[in-house]
Image (tube, rainbow, N blue to C red):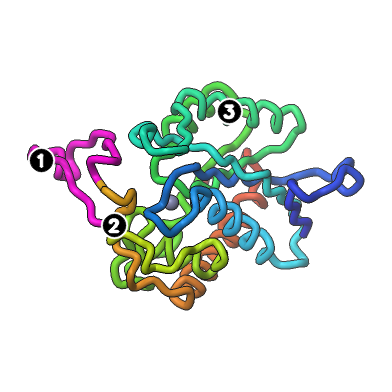
Amino acid sequence: MNSIDLEKAHWKELEHLAIDMAILPWGATEPHNRHLPYGTDTLCSRAVALEAVARIPEDSPLSIAVLPAMPYGVNTGQRDLNLCISIRPSLQYRLLEEIALTLREQKIPKLMIVNGHGGNNFKPLLRELQQNVPELFCCFTNWWTLKDGDEYFREQGDHAGELETSVMQYLYPELVLPLSEAGKGASRGFRPAGLSSRAVWAPREWTKVSSDTGVGNPAASSPLKAERFFTDAAKTLATYIADIAATDNSDLYE
Ligand SMILES: [Zn+2]
C-alpha cells in the first residue's frame, strides 16, 4: 500500500508510481458560529481522507494519493459575512474538470471527492464531468454522512453544532474557542408552507437563518463522542476507497 499525502510528497517517490485513485478533499471558507475556525470543513475533510487512506491494510497493492484540499466552496447565501469566500457552482465545475483532465492525461483512472461542506453539490457536477471526461471514473462522498450521527450525538446540528464542534474538539482542540464564546446556533426556517417542507427547496440567505452563523447548539459537544464517530467514518471510508480503487473501470457493475 502506497498512501500519498501529496502536499508533503516528493517527485523522487512519485516519478514512476502508477496511481490507482486520487482523493480530493473539498471544503469551504466560512464562519462557523463564534467558536470554530473558517477552515473547519476543509480541515475535517482532509483529516478524514488521510485517516481513511492510512487505514487501508499495508499489504494492499494499491497506490492512493490524497490531493491538497480545496479550501473554497459554494457559499452563495453567505457572501455578506465578513471574509466568507464563495465560488460559483460553475467555477467549481471548471476547477473539477481541470483536475480531472490532468489526471486523465496521467492515466490515473479514478477520482473520489471527499466533501465536507453542505453548500457543495457534486451530483450535477459529476454528471457534467461524466459527459466531458468519461475516461475518468469520478465519485464523491459527503463524509459527515458515512455514519449515522444520531447514534453518536444527542442533537447533531447542521452547521457548527454538536457533531461538527465535537469533531473539531477531537481533531484540532487548539482551534476551538471555549464554548462559552459560542452562540446557541438557533435558526429560522422559511415562512411559506412548502419551503419549510422537504418537498420544495430554495437556497437560504444565511444571515436571515442564523444570527451567530451556527445552526445547531454546540453545548453538548465532546471530543470523546467524536473520536468514535470520526474513527468509524474513517474505517468505513477506508473499505470503500480500497474496494473502488481495486476495481477496474471496465468492471464496476455486477
Ligand atoms: Zn462546516
Image quadrant for the N terminus?
Answer: bottom right
Q: Position of residue 192 (x, y in %)?
A: 8, 37
CA gap, disc 2 to disc 1?
Answer: 19 Å
Determine which residue is flagged by label 2. Answer: 185
- The one nearer the camera, 229 or 167, is 167
Is residue 217 at all visible to an observer of this figure?
yes
What residue is drawn where x is 74% and y is 47%?
Answer: 7
CA gap, disc 1 to disc 3?
Answer: 36 Å
Helix, strand or loop under label 1: loop
Helix, strand or loop under label 2: loop
Question: Mark 1 or mark 3, which is nearer to you?
Answer: 1
Q: Position of residue 167 (x, y in %)?
A: 48, 65
Earlier-in-chain disc, 2 versus 1: 2
Pick out the residue farthest to the bottom.
224
Residue 226 sits inside the magenta stretch: no
Classify mark 3: residues with Cα within 10 Å, few (<14), some (14-19) or many (20+).
Answer: few
Is residue 171 at all visible to an observer of this figure?
no
Earlier-in-chain disc, 1 versus 3: 3
Classify mark 1: residues with Cα within 10 Å, few (<14), some (14-19) or many (20+).
Answer: few
Helix, strand or loop under label 3: helix
Is residue 125 placed above or below 178 in the rendered structure?
Answer: above
- In the drawing, what numbered circle is on residue 191? 1
Classify mark 2: residues with Cα within 10 Å, few (<14), some (14-19) or many (20+).
Answer: many
Q: Position of residue 94 (x, y in %)?
A: 55, 24
Pick out the residue farthest to the right.
12
CA gap, disc 2 to disc 3?
Answer: 32 Å
- Specify start and end residues of the magenta stretch as a single range: 186-209
Determine which residue is flagged by label 3. Answer: 95
Q: Is residue 105 left or right of residue 30?
A: right
